[in-house]
Image (cartoon, rainbow, N blue to C red):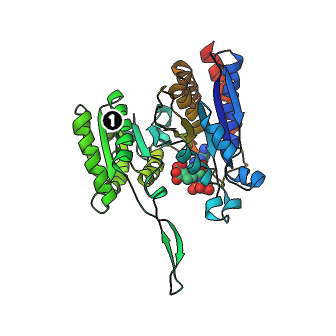
Amino acid sequence: PANKKLLMLPGDGIGPEVMREVSHILEWLDRRRIASFDIGQGLVGGASIDATGLPITPDVVDRAKNSDAVLFGAVGGPKWDKMGFDLRPEIAILTLRRELGLFANLRPATVLDPLIEASTLKPDIVRGLDIMIVREATGGIYFGEPRGIETLPDGQKRGINTEVYTTSEIERVARVAFDLARQRQGRVCSVEKANVMESGLLWRQTVTALGAAEYPDVALSHMYADNCAMQLVRNPRQFDVIVTGNLFGDLLSDLASMCTGSLGMLPSATLGAPDSSGRRLSLYEPIHGSAPDIAGQGIANPLAQTFSLAMLLRYSFDMKEEAALVEQACLAVLEQGLRTADIMQEGKTRVTTMEMGAAVMRELERLAA
Ligand code: NAD
Ligand code: IPM
Ligand code: MN
């Protein structure tokens, strides 16, 4: 079979630092002849701005469209914070989601046993936690029109963003959530603010109708987003699949990450609609950003990026065994007590990004032997 085409976009800050560890895993899979990849590299975010003046170039967007999967690091940083709004590094990831039609952002939050004590929540609250947040990623207030900053006659300025959802946008992301629930515990909680926003009310009505018509076997519940934030801290295990809009999904997934110990642990997959041949554009990235506060120090946790690769292998390349192998290697390293600073606990061994990456490689070798 033809080699799988993979585009790596490391980006800024800790993006390239954690991506480097993941590239060792890809080289290893290649060397062991487990899989062959056609790997491309590209610039995004501040790195692209410095080289080309743009946060992402049309060429990179095209190459992403022509790849079987994109592995994205993170973009942004103080160096580029004063750029014009349309030239900010963050435009790179928003452009990719939008141009590739990647509307379903899957953000799993699972608590690994060795990290139960690393969570800021009590062990009994998070033990065994396994939730899936399905965040809509190409609509809502991130993309709604009108938007902008305008000057009023009295000289004041007005900043405008608009939350917009159509029934078809809601239905397609809700389908992803319902389908996932069928493979899990069969429960979907749909989250919006139908009490204050018409877009939220339409969301609730649309998800309700779809659930009744096509997914009567899935238990559907509804929750206001503010309550959901509270419930995620009070009793996160009440949830199986959460489906929500772009902005609420962004907030709730960062929140959920702390149940698992660290933002540095959580991967994500962002999927488009399958085409007639079943091919589905997809991008994988940690949910964290470029972490300017620790960038350059070599202490970032590479596991969110590593788990993102595992999701890529599973969802895009149908390499379930290899995906499980990568996840088991990460778990084994944590069981041995190795910890980057963000998940450090008393009595454990503090390691750097590179040491964590090397330990994962050692475990891969051992598990595959
Ligand atoms: P952030 O996610 O970069 O960092 C938040 C906090 O978590 C920081 O204290 C950071 O050190 C820590 N952290 C994040 N990832 C970590 C890791 N792997 N290991 C250890 N600690 C980690 O969020 P922020 O500071 O609000 O944003 C920084 C920049 O990143 C901004 O420019 C923002 O727009 C951008 N950002 C980009 C993406 C993306 O590219 N998808 C996502 C979020 C934020
Ligand atoms: C994320 C990030 C992005 C978002 C930013 C960088 C545009 O926070 O992927 O969670 O808000 O979607
Ligand atoms: Mn975010």
Judged left or right of residue 43, residue 255 is left
How far across and how far down the image is residue 182, in percent? 32, 29
Left or right: residue 80 compared with residue 330: right
Q: Is residue 123 visible?
A: no
Q: Relative to the observer, which residue lies in front, 3 or 145? A: 145
The picture quadrant where one finds residue 31 is top right
Q: Residue at x 35, y 37 (%)?
A: 175
Local secondary structure at mark 1 = helix
Depth order, front residue of 162/178: 162
Counting from the top left corner in percent of width and height, residue 319 is at 54, 21
Residue denoted by label 1: 178
Q: Quadrant of residue 337?
A: top right
Query: Is residue 54 or residue 338 the one in the foreground?
Result: 54
Q: Which residue is pictured at 69% across the width and 22% down the height?
A: 28
Q: In the image, 278: left or right of 39?
A: left
Question: Is residue 338 depicted above or below 196 in this figure?
Answer: above
Q: Quadrant of the C terminus?
A: top right
Q: Mark 1: which amino acid?
A: Phe
Whether residue 165 is visible? yes
Residue 8, horizontal then vertical, whole percent: 67, 36
- Total numbered labels: 1
